[in-house]
Image: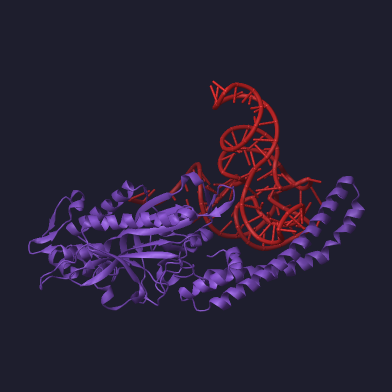
Amino acid sequence: MLQLNFIRDNKDLVIERLKVKNFKTPQESIEKLLDLDNLRRDIQKQLDDNKQKQNAIAKEIGMLFKQGNKEEAESKKAQTSTLKANEKELQEKHSSLETQIKNLLLSIPNLPHKSVPNGKGEEDNEVVAMIGTIPQMSEDCLPHWDLCKKYDIVDFDLGNKITGAGFPVYKGKGAKLQRALINFFLQEGENDGYMEIQPPLMVNEASAIATGQLPDKEAQMYVVTADNFYMIPTAEVPVTNIFRDTIVDKKDLPIRRCAYSQCFRREAGSYGKDVRGLNRLHQFDKVEIVCIDSPEHSYEQLEVMKKHVGGLLDKLGLPYRILRLCGGDISFTSALTFDFEVYSAAQKRWLEVSSVSNFESYQANRLKVRYKDDNGKMQLCHTLNGSALALPRVVAALLENNQTKDGIKIPECLQKFTGFDIIN
RNA sequence: GGAGAGUUGGCUGAGUGGUCGAUAGCGGCAGUCUUGAAAACUGUUGACCUUCACGGGUCCGGGGGUUCGAAUCCCUCACUCUCCGCCA
């Protein structure tokens, strides 16, 4: 969430930026927030004064008891009764205000970076780069779901039987291809300085709140009700939460982590051809990269991460484009996001395989990840993350783009992990 | 799942109702000494809210309660450890 101090000092700027994000009620929300905060501080002052008086009396009573002056001590006790009654009332007001302020703050999204274009939805995203050449396919080329069936490498019907839609079963070379991609991505991550993490696949409520999945996206997560755990929608959640409530040493920055995990998403409200085949799943595999750094370096790190993601796609030989997301399409918690989309030649469409974001201090404020700056002052870190990469759509594009009459060619960078160079 | 014991500042570890935000040691930082370093000695060393500042307030796993006063007593939840049971 945003920092209250910052909002207080930059009211007009905040309202202006929220408009770019298409936030419905910037003016009202911010003004209400500041009003509540003023009230809260006023009450806090009263509460502190009250407490101070009580503390003073308690101390006196303690002294009197020590001196053996019991009578006077007893008589002093009466003095606190009105103070206590008063305190209770103030306390209630104060905590009610605090909850209101917190809820309001949680409902306000991150401010978009100044480079974020205006826009309503994905049609307004800005294409900043287009890399590779779009393959010319023959008329009889197959979409990946047909290829999966033809070579018996991903079985959607079997997944339906065992669990339900969106839980495919990978078989034989299909399973091996998955394993190869995971290993390739993790190896590339390590090569670029990301320490590998194997995180829990379920997290508690505190973790889900800290990275912003709660309360915003509760309906998108699978909930394990018996123990009040949440299946992770991305490794970002457990990996970023490693640093929750920590003060990191400035000389350890930047912190880089990568993790392979399976990801679980309910995708409530998704229908139609978007969900065909591997395009949208309830369970999928992904390697995630996470970076934590100081505010002055976070945008350099964003570039470093973009380069890493682009490098993966280069090596896989997939044509891709990079989008700068517009205010209307950027996620709730992000300040600046670049999406990577690969071209899937048989479907003739772009598929998102990575999203690289700088959250600035928005997540860090909830997480309380801080460092001491050169003046010894506590500062919030900036957090960043990106997919590197999400598997299913990469597989979809690889299958479609690399199909030949002899079979599906495996990119060279994967062959040492697959042990084969063609699926036939 | 059953029984018991714990959870204190960066770490170790005292404190079991009254100047306790908390003894002490380690670690960290600064200084003295030294050509420099180490050692030794001296000092310093938590976070958060509020205030221009002085100051005030909160925090001893989380939440609630008892009391004039709680790290200390009670309730509750979470976690850790030991033993038993079950089990990959």
Answer yes or no: is residue A63 visible. Answer: yes
Which residue: 27% across, 51% down?
A183
The answer to whether A116 is drawn above or below residue B56 in the figure is: below
- Residue A31, by quadrant, is bottom right
Q: Residue furthest left?
A: A406
Total number of numbered labels? Answer: 0
Residue A219's spot in the image, x, y percent?
43, 72
Res A335 quadrant in image: bottom left
User: Can you say which quadrant of the picture contains the C terminus of chain A?
Assistant: bottom left
Residue A315 versus residue A94: which sits nearer the camera?
A315
Chain seen in purple: A
Q: Residue A192 placed where, x, y %?
A: 33, 48
> Which color scheme does this rendered protein use?
by chain
Res A201 seen here:
no
Q: Nearer the viewer, residue A70 or A407?
A: A407
Q: Position of residue A402 (x, y in %)?
A: 15, 62
Relative placement, left or right, of A110 versus A405 is: right
Q: Residue at x 36, y 47 (%)?
A: A193
Q: Residue at x 34, y 59 (%)?
A: A387
Look at the picture and state if A43 lies above or below A412: below
The chain painted red is B
Relative horizontal placement of residue A61, taking residue A135 as reference (left or right): right
In the rendered image, residue A34, in percent from the top left (x then y), is placed at: 63, 71
